[in-house]
Amino acid sequence: MLKNNIEMDVKMRCIEKVATQAKIAENIGTSPSYMNKIVRSKEQIMNKTFLAMMEDLDFDVELHYVKREEK
């Protein structure tokens, strides 16, 4: 399972960059409503739009793999 907590990171970075989520959506070629869906999602997110959004916000994206514990 991919865990994320990007909502706060995105909101804080937008404040730091004096940008809105709508402006970031425009920069990366997607709709503000789709970007909001990605940011607020509690489900798995890893797609081209997510990566473009994080890069536009000056984040590097790193994936860390953790071995699942046996049930």
Image (cartoon, rainbow, N blue to C red):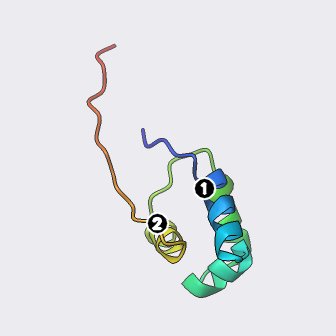
- Check disc 1 and report its element: helix, strand or loop: helix
Q: Nearer the viewer, residue 51 or 17?
A: 17
Distance of mark 1 from mark 2, alpha carbons? 10 Å
- Badge 1 vs badge 2, beta-carbon distance below 8 Å: yes
Q: Position of residue 68 (x, y in %)?
A: 30, 26
User: Dot 2, crowdedness within 10 Å: few (<14), some or many (≥20)?
Assistant: some
Q: Earlier in the sequence, mark 1 or mark 2?
A: 1
- Check disc 2 and report its element: helix, strand or loop: loop
Circle number at residue 9: 1
Residue located 42% across and 38% down the image:
1
Residue located 52% across and 46% down the image:
4
Q: Position of residue 26 (x, y in %)?
A: 65, 85
User: Dot 1, crowdedness within 10 Å: few (<14), some or many (≥20)?
Assistant: some
Which residue reaches farthest top?
A: 71
Q: Position of residue 60 (x, y in %)?
A: 40, 65
Residue located 45% across and 58% down the image:
46
- The kind of residue on which mark 2 rests is Phe
Picture layout, residue 63 above or below residue 10: above
- The kind of residue on which mark 1 rests is Asp
